[in-house]
Image (cartoon, helix red, strand yellow):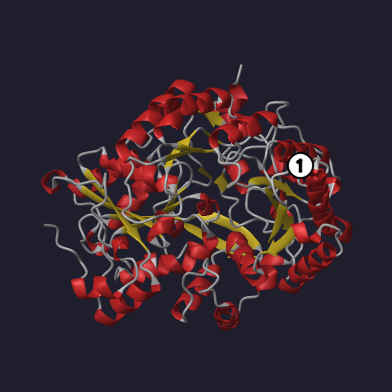
Amino acid sequence: MRKLALSDEILLSIEKPARYIGGEVNMARKDMSKVEIRFAMCFPDVYEIGMSHLGMQILYDMFNRREDIYCERIFSPWTDLDQIMREQHIPLFALESQDPVREFDFIGITLQYEMCYTNILQILDLGQIPLHWAERTEEDPIIIGGGPCAYNPEPLAEFFDMFYIGEGETVYFELMDRYKENKKRGGSRREFLEMAAEIEGIYVPAFYDVSYKEDGTIESMRPNNPHAKEKVTKQLVVSMDEAYYIENPVVPFIKVTQDRVVLEVMRGCIRGCRFCQAGNVYRPLREHSLEYLKDYASKLLKSTGHEEISLSSLSSSDYTHLEGIVNFLIDEFKDKGVNISLPSLRIDAFSLDVMSKVQDIRKSSLTFAPEAGSQRLRDVINKGLTEEIILKGAGEAFSGGWNRVKLYFMLGLPTETVEDMEGIAELSEKVAEIYYEIPKDQRNGKVQVVASSSFFVPKPFTPFQWAKMCTKEEFLERAYIVKDKFKKMLNQKSLKYNYHEADLTVLEGVLARGDRKISSLIEEAYKTGAIYDSWSEHFKNDIWMKAFETCGLDADFYTVRDRSLEEVFPWDFIDAGVSKEFLKREWQNAVSGKVTPNCREKCSGCGAMGFKGGVCYEA
């Protein structure tokens, strides 16, 4: 019988106790006499979100295949348990062993979204681990961060011992082996960090000094330790079929956000949307072979008992063998009660044909992401999608029996005009009109077109990293322009419009492009009550505004300020595979509305060819 860290009394008093007890199907169990490294894999959000994250599942499975490493999981306790743990001084624990996380060698924290940053401090605080790397002793775990937000690690630099830049399957084992080597010879924490800094892709913040100009921008960032590199190069898997993939995913007891088997078909994207960080930092596009996917689809469904399988990628329509894998899944599993989910598809005749085979049309809606309301602005962002394609796709969908469409847009994009904003309502109206061109007796009930707009945040390693953001007031003003235009549409009863929180977006922009000074802001906000900021019901903007004041920081400096092409960014020390020269070129192309062809049409010289794999080397 496993001993649980929480008493029955506590478990019965909190929401969803299954979040904290472990013991799920395929959970790793180890012979502790053979374990030399204990690694706690952490997702700084609630269990249901963390357990839906593919990257965490891959690394968990990869680590636990080694006899000498025991990888366990930790998630952010929900607010009810958080309060109890603080009141009763219960240390944060791992799900597998239920042991306190401060007893581990490593805590690896996934940095998936900027608005989870205060939850990282919650993890350290409840784990009874000093928040700052400078305060940790030989007895404390090594805190390592990785994931998309690690491409600008500087806002979190005070809290992490190291960051892993790139895809986790590449040099993690080399890092673990160096840790064992250092431990065996009685080396210190600092000696291990120096050994780690020599590994490609590992960044140790303590080994770098940042100097600033009078205007607050960065003058330089230089190593202060001979083991640290001037440039930290991202790590990536070149041959996808040779990389680790999950064979036995952990199956939660409770419903999680992505309650299905996930089959990753490829990494990267050929499209080159200028706002998209993932499309840039995951270059070049690399595919799994069809035989590999067939094999893993069967293994994963067998090992989990899940009744749904989803194809995962940034743009599944660009996968070379899409038809082959979809037909295999339909032939092999459709009659066995397995649903097939196909996100990230462009809506064309093939995709609609496939979706009609795998979805209940009456229950499902189709998703288009035009991103901008006018063709001019779609060219600025290099979306590669024309109004003609959008309306043709909608027409084919409606003829195929669908009557619900979701449209995703962004407000606040560079060069945006009132015409672009109003174009969101006008395009939504045109989509609805296409439906009413179908003879009445052939329609499937009433049409519903739901348009949603998020607000634009310029991210590191995108051509828009030089762009300025809107203020909260400007974002809302733009949303009201769109909302008012929707009210004037003839088919307004068939249309619905939603928009994101503006104040949260502004803060996301600060955290996304911030420097080391932002560490003090995050800590101040956390200590004054900020937690679960990515959940709108828990986000408290006034706490953050007060923290800016207390820390003497100006949000506008990070968001609405114009940036010159010569400015040194906090993330410039990272080589993410796309050169700054390419990004500058694309920024200038954006301003002039010039479209760049996708990677399969023509190489744009982004720099990713240096990795010697993927789409850059396709025959």
Position of residue 316 measured from the top left corner of the image (x, y, whole percent): 58, 35
Q: Quadrant of residue 416?
A: bottom right
Residue at 42% across, 44% down: 260
In the image, taking residue 195 as reference, residue 265 lies left or right, namely right
Quarter of the figure that contains the N terminus: bottom left
Is 286 above or below relative to 442? above
In the image, taking residue 356 as reference, residue 330 lies left or right, namely left
Residue at 37% across, 34% down: 244
Residue nearest the viewer, comparing 199 with 363? 363
Position of residue 188 measured from the top left corner of the image (x, y, whole percent): 26, 55
Residue nearest the viewer, comparing 252 with 616? 252
In the image, taking residue 286 as reference, residue 168 lies left or right, namely left
Residue at 52% across, 68% down: 535
Type of amino acid under label 1: Asp
Is 268 above or below relative to 547? above
* Mark 1, other Cα within 10 Å: few <14 / some 14–19 / many ≥20: few
Residue where numbered disc 1 is placed: 441
Is 373 above or below relative to 517? above
Residue at 24% across, 46% down: 28
In the image, taking residue 400 as reference, residue 259 lies left or right, namely left
